[in-house]
Image: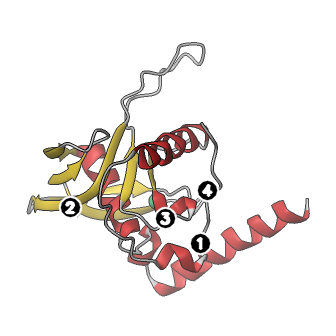
Amino acid sequence: MAILDIINVPDPLLKTISKPVDAVTDELRKLMDDMLQTMYIAPGIGLAAIQVGVAKRVIVVDVAEIPENPEEEPIREPKYLVNPEVVWESLEHNVFNEGCLSVPDHYADVERPISVKIRYLDYDGQKREERMEGLLATVVQHEIDHLNGIVFIDYLSKLKRSMIVKKVQKADKEKEDA
Ligand code: NI
């Protein structure tokens, strides 16, 4: 497995609308394995292919709890979603303080439906439909947004968004120069 480079805002690639996948092939599984590994190392709980520069409708998520004792092996519950679509969403919304691996160290409240039904192809290319709630529902909606060129800071005011983007750019530049 390989660790991939994650791109940060304001990289214009993050505004790309990703293309549907025709078939779940070994090559695509390799991408999903690498994405998952990259997400665990980051560490994060969700990653869309466009965040590693691949404009395909593929996301990986894992919202399993991390053990309090750092010596304990984390329980992994990875999910791979190919061509994910929201086919139903609850009228009830809630607010989560969201973050994003492409917007490192910045968090903001975003309101989304509390529960959704998602249609997707799994790791084996099987068609699935699953109802998701809570954190999983939030993360999957956040990742599907990435496939449509939307980053969570797009929901904030222009002023707030540009402040965050400037800070991320500055931090990235400092890392480059170091
Ligand atoms: Ni994100």
- Which residue has dot 1 on it? 9
Q: Nearer the viewer, residue 151 or 92?
A: 151
Alpha carbon distance from label 1 to label 4: 12 Å
Q: Which numbered disc flags the more N-terminal residue, 1 or 4?
A: 1
Q: Does 148 appear above or below 143? A: below
- Give the SS element for disc 4: loop
- CA gap between label 3 and label 1 equals 12 Å
Residue on which disc 3 sits: 50
Where's residue 4, x and y in %? 63, 50
Q: Give the label on residue 85, or none.
A: 2
Q: Position of residue 153 (x, y in %)?
A: 46, 72
Ranked by sequence position, the earlier of labels 4 and 2 is 2
Q: CA distance from mark 2 to mark 1?
A: 24 Å
Res. 105 mark: 4
Residue farthest to the right, as pictured: 178
In front: label 4 or label 2: 2
Q: Earlier in the sequence, mark 3 or mark 2?
A: 3
Look at the picture and state if 14 lies above or below 29: below
Image quarter of the N terminus: top right
